Image (tube, rainbow, N blue to C red):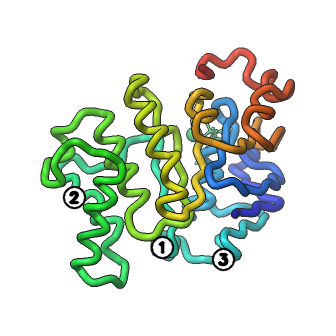
Amino acid sequence: MMEVSGLTVRFGGVLPLDDVSVTFESSTCGLIGPNGAGKTTFFNVLSGFVTPASGRVRAFGEDLLAMAHYRRARWGLRRTFQTEQAIEELSVYDNVAMIHEHSRLTSSKRRDDVLEAISFVGIQASPSDRVGTLGAGERRLVEMARCVVGSPRLVLLDEPAAGLPDDETNHLAAVIRRIPQHTGALVVLVDHDMGLVSATCETTSVLDFGHLIASGPTAEVLQDERVVNAYLGTKEVA
Ligand SMILES: Nc1ncnc2c1ncn2[C@@H]1O[C@H](COP(=O)(O)OP(=O)(O)OP(=O)(O)O)[C@@H](O)[C@H]1O
Ligand SMILES: [Mg+2]
């Protein structure tokens, strides 16, 4: 459960988030909106890359914004980025292990966690394979494994299905649906693929130029007139 209240971000004269208050209650929550709506900026606030002008975020009872950004990963914050982050020169195993290396666990428990995360997301390649030798879908799964390793509490996925063919998107949807039950984490999914959002998110919130314009059960939100209008003229919506 995450409660956002009065969140405002200012970039010069632009307000990419303007007094946004929203609660993420279901285990997998969609966050949608046209290009430039403020979705990635919101993730950047949660992960500490952007400092908001005002507002609060409580996640699992803790004041997330009061936490030093370098402590948020150990607390359980995980995210993917719109640009690929997996390191091609390293193995699948090392890419996932680097997220987990600061935990206080024994090295054998850490190793088990890393292998378990790799197996959970269904990577076909061997953990010792170099990421640079993998196809786009498998590399995306490496990023998903980085999100579930250890004990994640808040998993932020920023357009994880962008550019993937349908069969790989369907596999990704199955992985995303299993994350909350498997890890106990709250998942927030940003994507322009409404099929993926419908297949994975019980509830969905909609940003439009920094304003929250709808939030509720996904099927209802996607039919909301303001949401349909906000998307008119954008090509990305499937
Ligand atoms: N570092 C920055 N400095 C100035 N403006 C920024 C910065 N980052 C984002 N913006 C602006 O903030 C607004 C919101 O951008 P953001 O990337 O959050 O949108 P988005 O909803 O993720 O869009 P997309 O669907 O295209 O990824 C845009 O107008 C963008 O140009
Ligand atoms: Mg974005």
Task: Identify the residue under disc 1.
Answer: 70
Across and down, in percent, residue 200 comes to 58, 40
Q: Quadrant of the N terminus?
A: bottom right
Tell me where residue 117 sits by quadrant: bottom left
Q: Nearer the viewer, residue 114 or 199?
A: 199
Residue 141 left/right relative to 76: left
Q: Position of residue 145 (x, y in %)?
A: 36, 54
Name the element at disc 2: helix
**Residue 147 in view in this figure:** yes
Q: Which residue is mark 3?
A: 66
Q: Amino acid at mark 1?
A: Tyr
Mark 2 → mark 1, Cα distance in angstroms:
22 Å
Task: Say left or right for 18 vs 113.
Answer: right
Closer to the chain start, of discs 2 and 1, is: 1
Q: Does any portion of residue 47 appear in the rendered image?
A: no
Judge depth for marks 2 and 1 and give the one in front.
2
Above or below, 55 against 123 in this view is below
Residue for point 76% across, 60% down: 4
Q: Which residue is mark 2?
A: 93
Give whichever of discs 2 and 3 has the lower sequence position: 3
| Front residue of 109 and 75 | 109
Ligand 2: quadrant of the figure: top right
Give amino acid for label 3. Answer: Ala
Rendered residue at 29%/64% (across/down): 114
Residue at disc 1, secondary structure? helix
Residue flagged by tag 2: what amino acid is it?
Tyr
Helix, strand or loop at label 3? It is helix
Give the CA separation, mark 2 to mark 3.
32 Å
